[in-house]
Amino acid sequence: MSSAETERAEAARLPEGDVVGVLLNQHARIRDLFSDVKSAEGQHKRQAFDELRALLAVHETAEEMVLRPVAKDAAGQDETEARNREEEAANKVLADLEKMDVSSGDFDTTFARFEQSVIDHAEHEEREEFPFVVRECAEGKRKGMGTMLRAAEKIAPTHPHPGAAGSPMAQWTVGPFASLVDRTKDALRAAAPGG
């Protein structure tokens, strides 16, 4: 099993802006946030979960929009379909977690299962998808994909939208509109007293 430190070290070996390096660093941050949520209580736990939820929503959307179409050619359709199905399932659980009280036992139980599925998914990507992309795509293309990934993240939803998850086409079609709603909702929550 890899760790956040391993993922950061692998990312550091890739050129700056390489799409795989960007995604490996995000995987490391996701691991950090899972640990933070598990060890936190009260408002800090809610804030850590909200940060994790937003990162996962943006990360998975951008992967589906930018990486998956290229990985389909490099790693094969079966591989990319498996990753998309995992992301679709995770998106549904993330939507359920978002509605739960973070201090409840149900949240902790569901969160622990969710963490394991997300970590398993990331490790599948790192072993079965990323190496093909690195091998099959020239450095310049991977850097261009990194730039596209960052741009896609800016228009990606910050909350789970299970209806679009797992489908790059749906992400391109629905994602920007869902993002506008999500980011407006986030800004209003942040501006509200006690937000």
Image (cartoon, grey):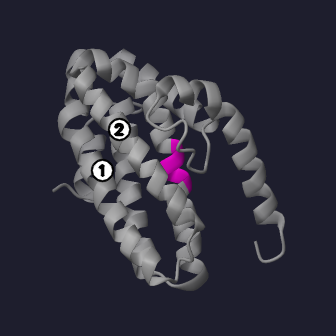
- The amino acid type found where label 1 is placed reads Arg
Image quadrant where one finds the C terminus = bottom right
Q: In the image, what residue occupies the spot 62% across and 33% down?
A: 175
Label drawn at residue 121: none
**In this view of the protein, can residue 147 be seen by the observer?**
no
* Residue 70 picture location, percent across and down: 35, 19
Q: In the image, what residue occupies the spot 40% across and 57% down?
A: 30
Mark 1 closeness class: few <14, some 14–19, many ≥20 residues within 10 Å: some
- Left or right: residue 57 versus residue 13 is right
Return the residue at label 1: 8
Mark 2 closeness class: few <14, some 14–19, many ≥20 residues within 10 Å: some
In this picture, is 51 found above or below 149?
Answer: below
- Left or right: residue 163 versus residue 34 is right
Image quadrant where one finds the N terminus = bottom left
Indicate the secondary structure of the residue bearing disc 1.
helix
Q: In the image, what residue occupies the spot 46% across and 29% down?
A: 167
Secondary structure mostly seen in the magenta stretch: helix
In this picture, is 181 found above or below 37?
Answer: above
**In this view of the protein, can residue 84 be seen by the observer?**
yes
Range of the magenta residues?
54-58
* Residue 5 picture location, percent across and down: 26, 58
Return the residue at label 2: 85
